[in-house]
Image (cartoon, rainbow, N blue to C red):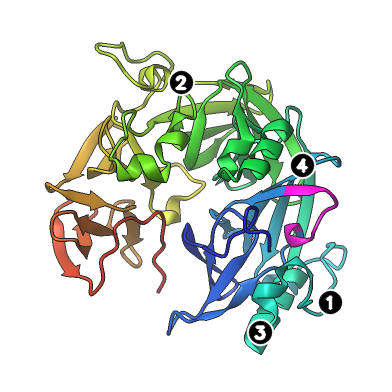
Amino acid sequence: MNGQLFTDDTGVTIQRVNNELLALTETIPGYIIDENTLDTVGPLVTLPYAEELKTEILTLTTAHVMYDSKRKMTVGYATRMTRSNGQWLDVIFIYDNEEQNNLSSTTDFNNNEADFDEGGRFLSITRNMNERGKKYNNSIKSQTKSFRYNYEHGASYMHSASITEDYLILSEIPLHFSLKKSLGTLLSGKVLTDMFKWNESLPTYFRIINLDNGEEIARISGPGFFTFHHINAYQMKDSIIIDICAYDDHRLVKELSLNKLRENIFPSGLGFIRRFHLNLNTKRCTEPFENVRQLSHEQTYPISYKNSLVPIQIDLPRINSNFTGKFYRFIYAVRGPPNYFFDALVKIDIESQQVTGLWKEPCTSPSEPIFVPKPESLEEDDGIILTIIFEQQTNKSFILLLDAKTFQEITRAYLPVHIPFSLHGNFYN
């Protein structure tokens, strides 16, 4: 592997796909993890965008794959960038093991009989793969369908997306791949994000794809903004409502560099919740909360503040996963005002537009709050919040459990190792 373009440090998140846990990041290889022992089973390198391209510079995938329970498939995507053959978006549908057998024979899957290839550019991490890893790679390859879409202004950085009952919604923000900057980055050894250029004069495009057949049904222009994380989306008649943790620009990317974090320099804080209304008939995007707030003091992200549902800076948003793609009410997130990096956990009621829960302790750093629903309960906030807290002064970490309704602490359990910073995780039975 080329160490500048690929990494086997799959530390962004854990997802379960077709009965195996996967450790994922934003470059091509993932890792299969044994659920009982947490041992590495082997790499996952058989997704369609793992195929090497002529003059390929970079392929960026999403670690935030989404599960479509209606069609029993996992949805993912990757942006592919080459030196002389263009740039495009690949979207993949990975069908569950049993679901492929129920699909029409006309469904165009990859070759079911294809054997796993131990060669190629991933030889260094595949040469000793065991039979379980090979079987899983072959299974994923045979159960995946892919679709290709072109870009208008060049490849866009997209960390996450949303699904509704019928659609995949991607936000193509104006942070675009630059061939000139990429060549400079490769020569200088800088980080991958230096290959992208912020184009403040361009809009964000919402690309909407039909989950039944991969057809692009609309590409709607909206205001330019930066985002890492979508929160949720749902359908209303001939429109889509989508909530996103948004920033006015991409300065956060620079502030998340290792040298800045080590110096505790985080001047801008996190983003704001913004809601976008996508009309599928008129192909127009509007913000229902545009300019709903007045600037009473200086804001690092004034546009996102004025258009926010709740005037609080957050990120790493989570919801009750049973409400993914549906009308919902509650968001759980980490708070990050200017000059602080993840200083508290919050529960937000978007119906009342209020912060209804706050957990905060001095000299602690919380991680993403994962909502675990109470079995059989129909109430959206009936469950627990599961997260990891790092104590800065003792250098210890503990698992924190909060009652999701009251946001009061249930218990905490200290870990045998410290976990100073983590991004994403999931809870699986």
Residue interval drawn in magenta: 49-57
Q: Mark 4 falls on what kind of element?
A: strand
Which x, y percent locates residue 171?
60, 35
Q: What residue type is labelled 1?
A: Ala
Q: Which amino acid does label 4 sit on?
A: Trp
Give the label, 2 or 1, closer to the camera.
Answer: 1
Which x, y percent locates residue 175?
60, 31
Residue at 21% in and 39% down? 356
Q: Which amino acid does label 3 sit on?
A: Asn
Judge whether residue 362 is colored magenta: no
Distance between the alpha carbons at the discs numbered 4 and 3: 33 Å
Q: Mark 1 points at which residue?
A: 114
Distance between the alpha carbons at the discs numbered 4 and 2: 31 Å
Q: Residue 128 got which mark?
A: 3
Which x, y percent locates residue 358?
18, 43
Residue at 42% in and 17% down? 303
Q: Would you say 409 lies left or right of 369 here? A: left
Give the label, 3 or 2, closer to the camera.
Answer: 3
Q: Name the residue under label 4.
A: 88
362 up-or-down from 247: above or below: below
Specify whether residue 311 is in view.
Answer: yes
Q: Which of marks 1 and 4 is nearer the N terminus?
A: 4
Residue at 61% in and 40% down? 169
Q: Mark 2 points at which residue?
A: 288
Judge whether residue 55 is colored magenta: yes
Q: Which of marks 3 and 1 is nearer the N terminus?
A: 1
Is residue 381 or residue 262 the one in the foreground? Answer: 262
Whether the residues at callouts 2 and 1 have beta carbons within 8 Å, the answer is: no
Q: Would you say 10 lies left or right of 399 here? A: right
Whether the residues at callouts 4 and 2 have beta carbons within 8 Å, the answer is: no
Distance between the alpha carbons at the discs numbered 3 and 1: 19 Å
Whether the residues at callouts 4 and 3 have beta carbons within 8 Å, the answer is: no
